[in-house]
Image (cartoon, rainbow, N blue to C red):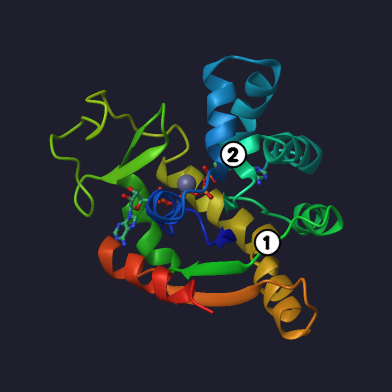
């Protein structure tokens, strides 16, 4: 299984990725998680990326494309992969296409902007794994504690309301065009073109999980 989860910040990409990767035994390639790991490790890339991420802007295409290219060389990518938060611009999508990285599905999770702010303000994450919870909609078993490791949960630095609004405008301008990009490719009839599926991201986490499963059928 080789797929892209597409959708605005807060659509639930990371939440659904956790279950899809487990079900299909494939790795989650989340450029956001990779960048947050670099920030934590205080690498040169991390120090540079932190400022951009905290402002809600996008890290340069060259850096991201390089990161993903290296990640795809890892042996765990042989049975497939799930891209979460990548590609996010037309040049990133072109890089994937030009490198002939195989894709079966592009699944777009659709959520209106007014629902997103509430999701982000209640989000709590386990930094080491990237697991996301929500204080109201998807709470951990013990408040503030990761279900699996027992470690503390934190709020992301870019989940401030003002930063979320900026991330949404960046999404509209730079990432939203990928909806057209992949849906017209799917309709072109080219054999390499991935199927395009659109699902609503409104409802419970379980309801959306069921929609994603249906979307990943031929
Ligand atoms: P990234 O980490 O990719 O952030 P994002 O795209 O803004 O997406 P989020 O992680 O915020 O949302 P999500 O869809 O994963 O939602 P989640 O499942 O957590 O990127 C961060 C930054 O890194 C970028 O701003 C950029 O600077 C940089 N970056 C990353 N990739 C890049 C790239 N390719 N190019 C350039 N720069 C890049 O859910 C959100 C909340 O909602 C959670 O609290 C969750 O519990 C809750 N929730 C989930 N499902 C439901 C539901 N059904 N009902 C109610 N609540 C729900
Ligand atoms: Zn995410």
Q: Quadrant of residue 160?
A: top left
Asked whether, in this view, residue 170 is left or right of residue 149, the answer is right
Where is residue 199 shown, x and y percent of the image? 45, 75
Q: In which quarter of the image is the N terminus?
A: bottom right
How many marks do you count on the picture?
2
Q: Is residue 183 above or below residue 146?
A: below
Which secondary structure, mark 2?
Answer: helix
How dense is the environment of label 1, judged by Cα within 10 Å: few (below 14), some, or many (20 and up)?
A: few
Front-most of 75 and 210?
Answer: 75
Asked whether, in this view, residue 212 is left or right of residue 32, the answer is left
Q: In which quarter of the image is the C terminus?
A: bottom right
Which secondary structure, mark 1?
Answer: helix
Residue lying furthest right in this view? Answer: 98
Q: Are marks 2 and 1 in contact (CB under 8 Å)?
A: no
How dense is the environment of label 2, judged by Cα within 10 Å: few (below 14), some, or many (20 and up)?
A: few
Q: Is residue 138 above or below residue 215?
A: above
Q: Is residue 54 visible?
A: no
Where is residue 141 shown, x and y percent of the image? 14, 39
Disc 2 and disc 1: Cα gap in Å?
A: 33 Å
Q: Which residue is drawn at the image coordinates 33% and 70% (left, top)?
A: 210
Of the numbered discs in the image, which one, if any, rests on residue 76?
2
Q: Can residue 39 be seen in this view?
A: yes
Of the numbered discs in the image, which one, if any, rests on residue 207?
none
Q: Which residue is drawn at the image coordinates 42% and 69% (left, top)?
A: 212
Asked whether, in this view, residue 171 is left or right of residue 163, the answer is right
Q: Earlier in the sequence, mark 2 or mark 1?
A: 2
For discs 2 and 1, the disc positioned in front in the rendered view: 2
Residue, disc 1: 173
Where is residue 59 shown, x and y percent of the image? 69, 38
């Amino acid at each position: 299984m080789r797929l892209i989860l597409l959708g605005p910040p807060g659509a639930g990409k990371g939440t659904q990725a956790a279950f899809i990767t487990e079900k299909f035994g494939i790795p989650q390639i989340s450029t956001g998680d990779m960048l947050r790991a670099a920030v934590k490790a205080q690498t040169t890339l991390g120090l540079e990326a932190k400022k951009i991420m905290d402002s809600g802007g996008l890290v340069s295409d060259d850096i991201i494309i390089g990161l993903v290219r290296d990640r795809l060389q890892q042996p765990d990518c042989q049975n497939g992969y799930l891209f979460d938060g990548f590609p996010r611009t037309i040049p990133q999508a072109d890089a994937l296409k030009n490198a002939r990285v195989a894709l079966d599905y592009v699944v777009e999770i659709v959520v209106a902007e007014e629902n997103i702010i509430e999701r982000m303000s209640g989000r709590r994450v386990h930094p080491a794994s990237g697991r996301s919870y929500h204080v109201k909609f998807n709470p951990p078993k013990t408040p503030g504690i990761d279900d699996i490791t027992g470690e503390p949960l934190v709020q992301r630095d870019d989940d401030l309301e003002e930063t979320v609004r900026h991330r949404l405008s960046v999404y509209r301008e730079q990432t939203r065009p990928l909806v057209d990009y992949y849906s017209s490719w799917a309709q072109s009839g080219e054999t390499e073109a991935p199927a395009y599926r659109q699902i609503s991201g409104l409802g419970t986490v379980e309801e959306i999980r069921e929609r994603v499963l249906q979307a990943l059928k031929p």
